[in-house]
Image (tube, coloured by chain):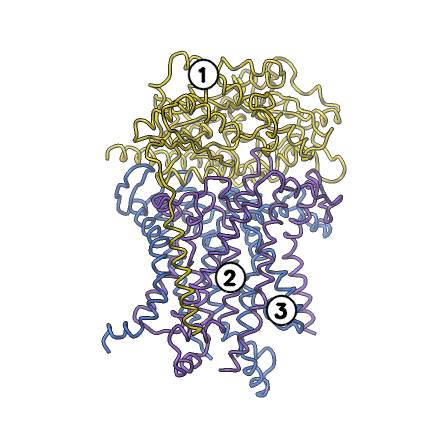
Amino acid sequence: MGCAMGKSLVIGSFLLALCACAADPPLDEDEIRLTLWTQDYWVGVTGHELDGVPLDDPRRAQYTVKDWYNKVARDFKALYPDRKIHIHIETLDWTSGFQKIDIAVASGRPPDVLISTSGIALKYARFGLLEAFDEYLSDEDIRDFGSFYGFSEYEGRHYFLPFIGGNRYMVANLEIFRERDAVHLLPSEGDRLWTYDQFLAAARATTFDRDGRIDVYGFAMPFQRNSPQQDQMPFFWGHGARQFNDNGDSLVINSEMGVKALQFMVDLEHVHGVVPTGSAGLRNNDVTDLWNAGRLAMRQAHHGTRRSHERALETGVIEEGVIELYPMMYPSLPGVDPGAFVVADSPCVFRQEDEEKRELSIALAKFLTNTRHEREAAYAMSTLPTRYSALDVWADDPFQQYVLRVARYGKKDAIQGYGIPLVNMTLSAFQAAMSRQATPGKALDDLARRGNRFIRRDIERRLRAGAE
Amino acid sequence: MLKYVFKVILALFAVLTLMPLYWIVVTAFQTPSVVLAFPPSLVPSPASWINFARLFNGSEIGTWMANSLIVTGTVTASNVLLGTLAGYTLAKKDFPGRQTIFWTVISLMFIPSQLTIIPLYALIVQLDWINTYQALIVPALIMPFSIFLMKQFLQTLPTELIEAARMDGCGEWGVFQRVILPLAKPGMGVLAIFTFMGVWNDFLWPLIVINQSSMLTLQVGLNSLQNQYYTDYGLLMAGAAVSALPMIAFFLVFQPYFVRSITIGAIKG
Amino acid sequence: MSLTRTIFKERWAYLFLLFPLLLFAVFNMLPMAATILLGFADYFPGGQPVWTGLENYAYALSDDLFWKALGITVLYTCGVVPASLLISLFLAYVIFGLKYAWAQVIFKSAFYLPVVTSGAILSLVWLWLFNPARGLLNYVLSFAGLGPYLWTSDPQMALPSLMFMAIMGGHGAAIVLLTAAMGGIPASYYEAARLDGAGPWRQYWKITLPLLRPTVLYLLVTSTIASFQVFTQVLMMTGGGPDYATTTLVYLIYTDAFEYFDFGKAAAEATLLSLSLAGIAVLQYKWLASDVEY
């Protein structure tokens, strides 16, 4: 008898499992479903700030990214009262979010609209997976986007709409410079440009043993799990070197000046000792941890640095009185303009079979990037507006005014189609030099050889795919 | 004498092994700015619940925990049951194709999941299972290592026991239920713990098949609380501590099963 | 007896295996077959695969990084698997010999607890332990006048650091399994051996170890697979660096697939990895599997 009971239990549980699988939600035939995936751009806001605040309140800067997108989706649907549109919004975190997009794309199931970094968009454009926007924009729109629109170009067509503008520059912690009586070493005129010698003097003055524990460092730069275009390339551009040729299909980073630039970074650690030892294994988080603890005098900064600084103060990650921000540009050789990473994280639209879905997806991308939304997003996320018509959002804010002004040092070299795929390779070469496994010259030669071999194969593969 | 040396080594090893876990707990109870202090402080001073407060106020952690429990519970129960059945069959029954089936099961573990996840994801989309429990549960209902583990565990059971039961007139199911199940308990306990642990901590799969916050599992949900610009160690470790609790409870509940029971079988044999 | 009659006679065996095999066929074998086939094709997301024969294999095998990654993976496995197994066997033996049940539970828990933390969190913790400037390891070593060491930031030390972490961290599961299996050995065996005048060491060697063989085989095979496929720690802690020093096979496969979108090459490498694992597993099986019974 016991046997029979056990048997029916097993069979019953299988049947139950099968039933659970069979239940499907009913589908509405007329409904048009759009999926919108976006990186999570807000800085650690929890969502409870929203309670009791009307949607038009300027304090909207406190909302989560999803609240804002929900509002945009509602407004968008209101433009098409005769159609049933369902917009599914999903936010992607910054570590595993990329894996999620890649797997979805690789298995042929990408979202309809994706808001991610320019590099990611160009990576998919390279595979011909995106719709181009060229036919859908008015001249007025193109003028309004200005130079940001040029960043979205790949082989003559434009694959994303500039939305969340961002850039890189440097920032000093004035508290440390005051402690060392070295504020005068920082650049203060105009765009705050300076030379490598001046930079080195500032870094030397602020590297010291404060309390017998960990040293305070003048500068620190991550060489692991970071973006070489954001972190290291500014030193190459400041030397007049570059990563890619004009077409973006060949690595030229192993030029004479390129080697000098990498040698400069190696010397920062091994000759001057103004950066933490073991840079080759340093991650962005390590640099931030040092900075937040008030033990780093200068570092790389971005459009949202001030906002995330305020956020860190609120949550207690940074204590009061430890850090005062002072923005400035990267150093460069005399006579050479500094260069910086400037991007516009942007909606792109994945290729659509269905005419109506294509039209709506592109309309949604355009709607997201209109002047009003540019202004709102820039204000809420502390980013750069990517339309001239929205520039006034930072009119009363000298810090963000400076950030906006130095965006003109942006380099197209920073966002080439092959930039993202070569990240790992490039970092490995830098690491080899930083840990003195290879001289800068050898490391960069190896990188160029390996990278160009990959690019050749990639081009062959794409030609073959095009021929099929 | 040697015995005491062994015991000292054991204790030392235990302390070393527990070190990372200890740091997780300490960090969870520390205010955010103390986390980065040097030299590392081994006691949270001042101890603070702030990270847990942030964790529970700002998120749907209750829902995520419930989702994780549903998924992990179902998968664990199913793996223990199916794994024991199949493991017993492969260990103790002689039938054409036994070796082939065994090696097929083993070989499923060889290919790295980082790649098979792509076609698997396409399959789940095809089945329209995105954002459902079945996407999390069904592919994991039985895993190769469960069968392998139970097969290895049951292999040493005396065959005479099975034959004796058959002599007593028990059918195949009866043999399994009356003889094998009681003897397999320690193995099943171990398997339950392994499966629970693996599924509970699984990250990549739930990340890609779930697209809405209310369906997230705990690990993915906790990860979504991190921000773009810096690691919030306090929040992270408070989350890790909370997510470890069910597993610790599960372990303590199931661990008595490993110890007893087999002796009973041995007397009978 | 004809084959059909044998099959019919053993129909229960097939019935017991039916449901697992069906699930495997759909959710394991199908994706696995797709992956293996992809190794003979060039696939662009959104397009149709183009058959290219052995081209991916030729490309993978001519890539010096593939051989480097293979070497690193083999080194990692050879270092981690035997060391972990020996340590687990030793610890399980000592724990099992403890007189009081509560003491056994405490130690089993102590070793098991760290395993309940996810690999991603453990990686973060170890990054902090390894941190050259403010990590615990350098802090402790400084009292002995040693260091500071760069650990994962040094190309020479990065792989040994990861191995050290694996050897220190992962015994919980093995100990739980081994003690459970040791509990299954009938006490009468040991009594008989004692009567024959066998000491504890001889008892362990002649009774415990042989009867643990199936369990040890399981541990050996699964930990070899896990080590050969080590990934999370590499992704979280070193990103395969510095200077490729920790680029393991699965990490290489991962970057080929998701950074270079070269799924064909990644699939070819994954197939080669699987074949090596199959070879190793067969050897391990031949070495340890005699169907031991009481």
- Residue placed at 39% from the left, 38% from the top? C260
Q: Which residue is mark 3?
A: C95
Given residues B221 and B232, the one toward you in this image is B221
> Disc 1, disc 3: CB below 8 Å?
no
At which x and y percent is residue A188? 65, 16
Q: What kind of element bears circle 2?
A: helix
Residue that mark 1 sits on: A145
The residue indicated by pointer 2 is: B192
The Cα–Cα distance between marks 2 and 3, rounded to whole angstroms, is: 21 Å
What's the chain of the residue with tag 2? B
- Chain of the residue displaying label 1: A
Q: Which chain is yellow?
A: A
Which chain's colour is blue?
A: C
Mark 2 or 3, closer to the camera: 2
From the viewer's perspective, is C101 left or right of A413? right
Palette colour of chain B: purple
